[in-house]
Image (spheres, rainbow, N blue to C red):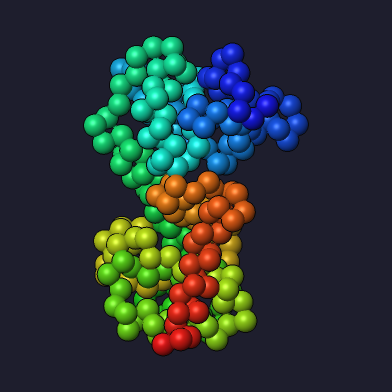
Amino acid sequence: MPGTAPDDPLDAGPRKGAAAAARFCVATGEVKPVDQMIRFVLGPDGAAVPDLRRRLPGRGIWITATRQALGVAIARKAFTRGFKRDVRFAPDFLDMTERLIERAALDALAIIHKAGTAAIGFSNVDAALTRARVVALLNAAEASPHGRKKLLSALRQREDFAEIVVIDAFTSPQLDLAFGRSNVIHAALLAGPESETFLARAARLACFRAGLTPGVPGSGDNQIRKSASAELRHEGKT
C-alpha cells in the first residue's frame, strides 16, 4: 500500500493486472505509476545510472521523476539502502539526469523531422497555423518577442488554440541539431504519434525541472499545454 516500503524495494511493485505498472518510490515512500518515475540501476563500477527507457539489465530502484525527489533520495541515502551497497554518484548527477531527459526529448524531435511532420521556419510555421493540424508550437529560447507575438496572434485565431502546446525550453543550437539544419528559431509540430512521443518527453522534462509529478492532473500533467493558454491570454491584453 502507498507509504509502506516493501521488504525489498529493488524493482518492487504489483505484478498483476493494471497495478503491475506501479513501483515503490524510495524517496517519497509511495507506490506510483511507472510513468511518474525514473528507474535507476548500478553500473559495473557501482555508479548510479538513470534508466529512462527501463531496459537496462540488473535490478533497479524507482524514484519520482522530479529533481527534488532525486535530491531527497541522495541526501537520505536511499540508493545505498535500496541496493544494499555503497553507491557512487557523478559530481553533477542531478544535472546529468536532467540532460538525459532533455536529450530524450530532442531525439524525439529528430524522429519528427524524419517523419516529415514538422513545419520549420517562420513562414512555414505561420502557414501551418492557418491550415494544418498543429499540436505544438516551438520557439527557440532566443526567439525575438516580435516573432513570438506574431505567431501567437496567428495561433489565437484557431478554435483549438488552447489545445496547442507552446514550448520554448530549447535553444536554437539544440533545435538545429534535432532538425538537421541551421538557425532554427520557430517550428510547428503536426499531429501524429511522433509528436505525441515528443510532447510526453517534453512534459517529463518540464515536470522534472519544476518539481511537479508527471501524470497527476493539476500537478504538472498539462504544464506545457497550460503555458500556451497563459501566453495567449497575456497576448490578448497587450
Quadrant (top left, top right, bottom left, bottom right) of the C terminus: bottom left
In the rendering, at what x and y percent does residue 60 appear? Answer: 49, 23
In the rendering, at what x and y percent does residue 144 appear? Answer: 29, 78
In the rendering, at what x and y percent does residue 47 appear? Answer: 33, 22
Q: Is residue 18 left or right of residue 35?
A: right
**What residue is rendered at 61% in x and 31% in y?**
31
Q: Is residue 216 above or below residue 162?
A: above
Q: How many marks?
A: 0
Quadrant (top left, top right, bottom left, bottom right) of the N terminus: top right
Q: Is residue 89 left or right of residue 234?
A: left
Residue 118 seen by the camera: no
**The furthest residue to the right:** 17
Q: Nearer the viewer, residue 129 or 30?
A: 30
In the rendering, at what x and y percent does residue 149 appear? Answer: 39, 83
**What residue is rendered at 36% in x and 44% in y?**
98
Q: Is residue 59 above or below residue 170?
A: above
**The furthest residue to the left:** 91
Q: Is residue 13 left or right of residue 179?
A: right
**What residue is rendered at 59% in x and 56% in y?**
218
Q: Nearer the viewer, residue 182 or 150?
A: 150
Q: Is residue 174 above or below residue 75?
A: below
**What residue is rendered at 62% in x and 54% in y?**
217
Q: Nearer the viewer, residue 200 or 178?
A: 200
Occupied quadrant, residue 73: top left
Residue 149 seen by the camera: yes
